[in-house]
Amino acid sequence: MIRRPALVILLVMLLAGVACQTMKKVAYDLDPSQRPAEAAYREAIAPYISKGEIYHGPATELLIRALPLVTPVRLAMARRKAAAYDLDQAQLEQELAAARKDGAGDLEVVAAVYMPEEQWNNLDSQRPSWRVYLKPATGPKLHAVDARRIKKRSALNQALYPFWGMWSRLYRLRFPFKPDAKGNYPGTQGTVKLIIAGPPGMVELPLRLK
């Protein structure tokens, strides 16, 4: 026979176990990174995300996270969008076809940039405080021909750019750099350097292109 104190302890333990399992389920449901579509997308783009920092002593001058929108990344984005909006197979095929077409054009890079001085965080300005360009292994540097800031923190943008921090600004940069018919970029061996340079310093980020 189980004595009353022991029975009470047993019931408390059982209730605690049930509560723990309930909390785990709630945490799973609330954490989108644990859902299959989100987890698959993050796994697909993780090898393409590049990080860079500039510090002066303990002071942070710049933090940047960059994602090149090459065809594999665009295809992953198309699948993530299709999963988000429950698109049917025909709609998914349209999204994938558009992703392949865009991937064959100028190279675009999405960059989340943090600077403590917000007035310097102006890559989309006609007179930016920083210069951004690509540096292939061979050939000249390529300056961005278009730089646009993504301001809308929509649910889809937050899902597609999980590296977009609360205090960062998100930019879409376009460079005159296209792949050949086989998807290879000239003057590279599958990678290219993204360089951001300004008065506080310079940082080089290797970008994976394949």
Image (tube, grey):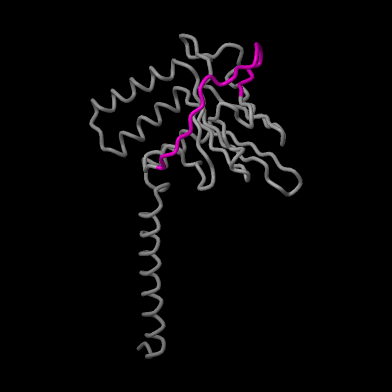
7 lies above or below 144: below
155 lies above or below 48: below
167 vs 108, nearest the viewer: 167
Residue sitting at the far bottom: 4
85 vs 18, nearest the viewer: 85
16 falls in the magenta region: no
Q: Which residue is drawn at 52% across and 31% down?
A: 67
Residue sitting at the far top: 181
The residue segment tinted magenta is 133-153
x, y (%) of residue 115? Answer: 61, 42
151 falls in the magenta region: yes
x, y (%) of residue 16? Answer: 40, 73
Q: Which residue is drawn at 25% across and 33% down?
A: 87
Q: How many marks?
A: 0
Q: Residue at x 69, y 39 (%)?
A: 54
Question: Is 198 left or right of 106, judged from the image as shown?
Answer: right
Q: Which residue is drawn at 61% across and 12% down?
A: 187
x, y (%) of residue 95? Answer: 32, 25
Residue sitting at the far right: 57
- The N terminus appears in which quarter of the rendering? bottom left
11 lies above or below 22: below
Question: Is 56 left or right of 9, judged from the image as shown?
Answer: right
x, y (%) of residue 83? Answer: 31, 37
196 vs 44, nearest the viewer: 196
